[in-house]
Amino acid sequence: MEIMELADRKNSVYVNRELSWLKFNLRVLEESEDPNVPLFERLRFVSIFASNLDEFYMVRVGSLYDQLVLNKQVLDSKTGMSSKEQLAAIFDQTKLILPRKDQAYAHIIAEMGEYHVAQVDPNNLSDEDYEFLSAYFEKEVLPLTSPQIIDKHHPFPFLKSKELYIGVHIAGKNENTVRLGIIPASGSFSRVVFLPSRDGIRFMLVEDLLCLFADRIFLKHKIQDKTIFRITRNADLNVEDSTYDFDLDYREAMTELLKKRKKLAPVRLELLNAINVNMMNYLCEHLELSHEQVFVNRSPLDFSFMSALEGKLQKEKDLFFKPVSPQKSPYINPDEAMIPQIQRRDLLLHYPYNSFDPFIRLLNEAAEDPKVVSIQITLYRVAKDSKVVNALIKAAENGKEVKAVVELRARFDEENNIDWSKQMEEAGVNVMYGLDEYKVHSKLLLITRKSGNHIEYITQIGTGNYNEKTAKLYTDLCLMTANKEIGADASVVFNSLFMGNMVESSEHLLVAPLCFKSKIIELIDNEIAFAKQGQPASIQLKMNSVSDRVLIDKLIEASKAGVEVKMVVRGILCMRTGVEGETENIQAISIVGRFLEHSRIYVFGVGDRQKIYIASADFMTRNTERRVEVAAPIYDERLKEELLSILDVLFRDNVKARIQLPDGSYTYRRNNQEPLDAQAYFYRKAYEQAKERFYTAPQKKKFHFPFFHKDR
């Protein structure tokens, strides 16, 4: 089953962004079908697929829905599809994908039977199970329920986004009359009910229990039909909207925005199993949804129950990935301060394979260093209990000038960022919230030191957030350098931000929105010129998504000129590669595995003229035109070799890599080479390097012990 464009656009080299994203999420779901992935991890991939789809409907579908409701004619820049056409295609493709999700879940639960784990079917209970569940319901659940009947005296209630409800169709005076009973399936009771078992784990979800005994809640009514359901509400609301109260402080405005988001219109109705037409029509009418926006599932609508189940299964090691932990970099001495090491040579960390600790050490040392006069940082997403923010607070309390650009519009992290911004301000940190129309998405740190009459810079540029939690789950890169020119550019970035301006010129760093796309185009044009002269020309890119039409067209132009373009694009890719006469010199792979591929690497040219960058930006219009992003050049030859080696391994992955075919579909790359899972390779290498003496070049070795998957 493959997601395609509308029939009349199948021959286009361009791909719709939303449909490309659905293809990506299908690749996530494929991980749940891979027998080489441990069983509970396969279940986790089903959960990730579902969570991804939730956010997609809240944000992307929500945005298209707004365009349709407000009658805004915004056409997709790649395919020319209208909002209505895109929504119709999304709804159709979602309904094609969901049965595959249901099937994956059913297979995983069935296979868990080998480990004596079973989800109890409420329609197939033994007498003993029925008696236990009946008693449990009466004692533990029923007293905590808050049911409601909807009729002319009781208006349709407000339903929370993504909350589970039991919908009960109560018989009216005639068969066409619908009276609805609603039972919230969340409350002070447990989500998972564990049944007695002598030799295993048997469980039922509480929503199934509520549905089973719904007749005991609506005792005086005849129940005609019942189902478990939930709605997803639009979450695409920005502080720049006309609803913004300009008399409020920006942080207060964001707080008000979060309250409004919870009340936005529904964009999706999910049902567990089908219901009768009358009840369907009733729900759609009151929720103002079309039948296109109704999706029937055969597996749970919410996978948050997994943590309770996981806690019961810890002894079953085969169900999980083999544990790994970030390793010490062989190039960083743990017994020496970070700043002198960085002053001697640029350092690079590769997460999650390398530990995040050296970066935390750098911040804590800067907080105590008498020569440090200021610390400036951009914060987009941080951990709940952030060691990064705690180090900044300590620095401020020690009298350092600390400036933090906290992006309050980091979607779904707004509340966390609001809380941290308050704590930092109370500690004396100078906090700003970014620019009016541009999110600050860069990952930039500048430490300024004064040594005698000299000003010294320590600059850190990353591809991922300053979040020690996600640094164990996402692949990212962290460059730490004492390069004066890069430090001077970083100083310009921070001065511009705190003055409310955008960077208009930059010598070394590429800084969006004004000094990024034009320089990328210049670098691509340079390769085109070499190719037209018959000389070797190459572009290598690694990022999350590619959707910027201008950059896509420039890459197509490069392909036509004979430039070899190789890309690792995990998610959205709005063009078809390998198309004769158009993109035949472009190769694209997507790697979806245990860790989320998040690092961005750009390589332009070959040999001595090769230029390499790491960046916070994808090739998406929102990154190149509507955000403050930073890409940093790599000047250290050892680090250049390391990044090229990383790309080489990724391009040779033949276990988790999917290659895009000319028709836009993806297939696992399989060849006769020895199996290579890039993520497993990098972790094994990190373990081997950690054993070696500091500053020694690691030897090339073969690694045989499996970290991730069952032996193939």
Image (cartoon, rainbow, N blue to C red):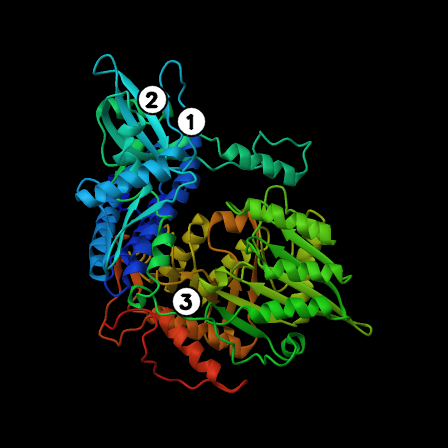
Q: Is residue 180 above or below residue 384?
A: above
Q: Residue at x 40, y 18 (%)?
A: 154
Q: Is residue 298 above or below residue 354?
A: above
Q: Quadrant of residue 559?
A: bottom left
Three-letter code, disc 3? Ala
Return the disc, 3 or 1, that comes first in the chain's sequence.
1
Q: Residue at x 27, y 26 (%)?
A: 280
Three-letter code, disc 2? Glu
Other residues around mark 3 within 10 Å, as few (<14) / some (14–19) / many (≥20): many
Q: Secondary structure at mark 2?
A: helix
Other residues around mark 1 within 10 Å, as few (<14) / some (14–19) / many (≥20): few
Residue sitting nearer the eye, 362 or 461 = 362
Return the disc, 2 or 1, that comes first in the chain's sequence.
1
| Residue for badge 3 | 531
Other residues around mark 2 within 10 Å, as few (<14) / some (14–19) / many (≥20): few
Which mark identifies residue 69?
A: 1
Q: Residue at x 32, y 38 (%)?
A: 137
Q: Secondary structure at mark 1?
A: helix
Marks 3 and 1, how far apart in space?
48 Å
Which mark identifies residue 285?
A: 2
Three-letter code, disc 1? Val
Q: Residue at x 61, y 78 (%)?
A: 345
